Amino acid sequence: MINREFFFKGYKSILAHDSPAIALGCCFIAIGALLKNLGFNIQESIFSTMLTYALPGSLVMAESLLVGASLINIFLAVWLVNARLYPMAVSLFPLMIHEDQPKWKYYFSCHFIAVSAWLIMKSNYNSIPKKQRIDYWIGIGSATWSVAIIGTFIGFFFSEYLNKDMMMGLAILNPIYFLCMMVGASKTIQITLSVLLGAILGPIFYFLTPEWSILLGGIVGGTIAYLVGELHVS
Amino acid sequence: MSVNIVLAIFVTSLATFLSRILGALSSERIKETSKIFKWFNCLAYATLAALISRTIIFPVGILNEASYFIRLIVVVLSLIVFLISKKNYVYPTIFSAFCMSLLSNFF
């Protein structure tokens, strides 16, 4: 089954000095408060975080519900904003695949793919033996998932005490945290260029097609960065 | 609200899980040393960067109520805090929340 030592090593990674736990928790506090204001009950709010566990997707769902969008519209809007999870999974799982590990672990743990857990794994995988990486990943994922659920719970019950300014503070926290993590991760030409081009092209494509802007910005920016990096190496 | 909340939650989680499971399934044949892995790595970072900049410049939700100028000040000051704190992730994050709350209260 799951190697306990590496699972807990992964789980404890959220206690590190530069852990995403605070940022992640605060963002889900905002989500919990938002869902309550939308008319969700506590069970629905918790299940929403448990099953979706992707902040931008939850925000898009909330916005779509507010404007009275249909289920198909919600599906498409969420799929487009969360399609980033596909390249994130493809650029993470090959680092963890080991022939001695059962496949169910990979299928089960793909639910934990989210920015915070992904960035922690990306910066730590080198220090973990390949065979145990999947157990370490399940540990990281379980920890960030628990933080998200607890955050939603707190946000739901404390929503009355959060005024507009505080909600704005909670809302900016997550993009700033991810921005710093991306700047910190920019150590090679390919990654630095990917981050820069993605950040510039995403908003530019927004003027052409708001729904597809993230995907288009990512594909065009990432491909240019990859080609430039390959040319630089050769 | 015209759509049932429970159905909306299921649809949202299905749309999200689809990308995750497809990613897990298609990465079975990809080696970490291959070119396609490197390309997907670039795509992942670029897509994340696109998402973050879109969240800050064209936000969904309450951030929309803060002006561009306030958002820009918060981002620049937080990045300065990040650099002077020797790339610590927690200080700029907490700073950004206080900074945004204060600025949106005063302006």
Image: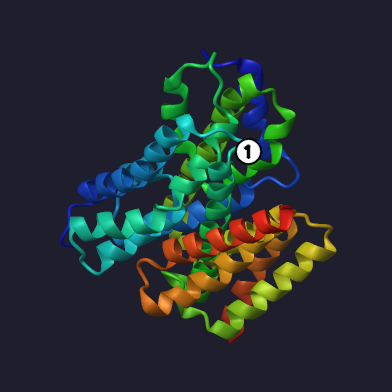
Res B101 → quadrant: bottom right
Look at the image and tell me whether residue A90 can be seen: yes
Q: Residue at x 53, y 32 (%)?
A: A142
Instruction: Name the residue rendered at 70%, 65% in the picture.
Output: B95
Q: Secondary structure at mark 1?
A: helix
Give the residue at the far left of this rendering.
B2
**Residue drawn where x is 60% and y is 15% of the image:** A3
Query: Numbered disc 1: what chain?
Result: A
| Amino acid carrying mark 1 in the image | Met
Whether residue A164 is visible = no
Q: Position of residue B61 (x, y in %)?
A: 41, 69
Q: Position of residue A69 (x, y in %)?
A: 21, 64
* Picture layout, residue A112 above or below residue A99: below
Q: How many marks on residues?
A: 1
Q: Which residue is mark 1?
A: A121
Q: How is the image coloured?
A: rainbow
Q: Position of residue B69 (x, y in %)?
A: 59, 85
Drawn side of residue A71 relative to residue A207, left or right: left
The residue depicted at 56 percent of the width and 26 percent of the height is A134
| Image coords of residue A155 (percent x, y) | 47, 53
Q: Count residues near mark 1 (Cα–Cα under 10 Å), then give few for <14, some for 14-19, many for 20+.
A: many
**Residue reaching furthest to the front:** A234
